Amino acid sequence: MKRIALILLCLLVLSCGNEPAVKKNSSTPKRVVEVPTFNSDSAYDFIAKQVAFGPRVPNSKAHQACGAYLINTLNGYCDTVIVQEADLTAFDGNVLESKNIIASFKPERAKRVMLCAHWDTRPFADQAETNKNTPIEGANDGGSGVAVLLEMARQFSMKKPDVGVDIILFDSEDYGQPEESDYPRMQHSYCLGSQYWAQNLHKPNYFAKYGILLDMVGGKEAVFTQELASMTFAERTVKKVWNTAAVLGYGGQFLFQKTNLVVDDHYYINNYANGRVPTIDIIEHDASRKNKFYKHWHTHEDKLEHIDKNTLKAVGQTVMHVVYNE
Ligand code: AHN
Ligand code: ZN
């Protein structure tokens, strides 16, 4: 009997000492997150789908149809979709029936990130030599950013990131006044949808840790530099994204090189939304060109055939890695 009591006592002592070898505290290394693979074939198909509607110029049939397609597609992947409608007056007096599309994962989560792109395309080709007044296909300028976000939404639907995510597709970004224009000069004629959103948030107290804008992210051998407004308002996020790209092997496309201001959607988000969403711009920078952007920028050559899946992959995988690690 004594012997049994002794064995029981020993077992008790042993089981009490059976604590986990590593205590969970602040010194525990950061958790390792499995990041799904960004599928660039799927992203490419999302560009093809948009381009097939025709140029997505505000107030056109193609714009209307593509908007419906984007809302429907995001509804299939995300928890909620809010459509913010606004009539926005362009430099030429046209009132653009605009739709900002806001699709969310975990809309109740306080900790969130915002990812955005513009979905409309330019009504002119003012950088082209001929037919400057006919619209562009906008495979890269309009199509690519949206497509990368749609593919990310598809991935998020299969494996939700811990952080809340808002994907915002801005409208009426590219109806800006051409340099040669007979209309009186209008200030801030680009980015009408994001200007409206930044001054009329879709939720009154909307806040995100940071925002990432994707613009022209499908060009062959595109390089992305550290643009001034991104560095001024969201330097930590620029560093996080560029360091992540380097770790993933995309350092050849994400250059640690500082470049001049680009007045893009992020500029208005940073300036008008009271620092609620410090936002960076991932936009192709071409040092060899006077316009500094994608080589087919605002020409009729901005077509699907010039889209490079490797660039879509570099951007999509990098941003996904950042999001899943929040
Ligand atoms: C300007 O051309 C003033 N900003 C560049 C914004 C833009 C146009 N992104 C794509 N198309
Ligand atoms: Zn453009």
Image (spheres, rainbow, N blue to C red):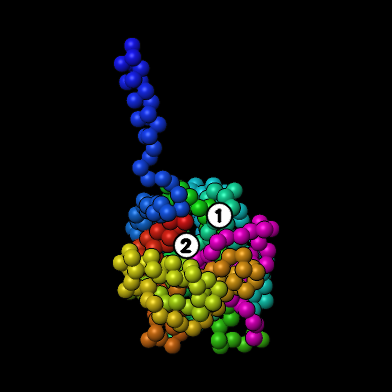
Q: Looking at mark 2, is its residue's CB closer than 8 Å to ligand 1?
A: no
Is residue 192 rendered magenta in the image?
yes
**Residue sitting at the far front:** 2
Horizontal arrangement in the rendering, residue 227 relative to residue 87 (left or right)? left
Residue 251: quadrant of the picture: bottom left
Tell me which amino acid carries mark 2.
Answer: Val
- The residue range painted magenta reads 185-213
Q: Position of residue 224 (x, y in %)?
A: 40, 75
- Which residue position holds label 1? 111
Secondary element under disc 2, as helix, strand or loop, is helix
**Which residue is rendered at x = 40% and y = 31% of the image?**
16
Q: Residue at x 53, y 59 (%)?
A: 113
The image shows residue 10, relative to residue 167, as above or below, that is above
Quarter of the image that includes the N terminus: top left
Q: Position of residue 242 (x, y in %)?
A: 40, 70
Residue drawn at (57%, 57%) of the image? 102
> Gap in Å between the C-alphas at discs 2 and 1?
23 Å
Q: How many tags in the picture?
A: 2
* Circle 1: residue type: Lys
Percent across and percent down for residue 279 are 54, 68
Q: Residues within 10 Å of mark 2 (few under 14, many from 20)?
A: many
Q: Is residue 74 visible?
A: no
Identify which residue is drawn at 51% across, 61% down. 115
Q: Nearer the viewer, residue 263 or 300?
A: 263
Residue 4 versus residue 134 in the image, above or below? above
Left or right: where 65 falls relative to 198: left
If you read the primary sequence from the N terminus, does the residue marked by circle 2 or circle 1 appear first? 1
Q: Which residue is mark 2?
A: 146
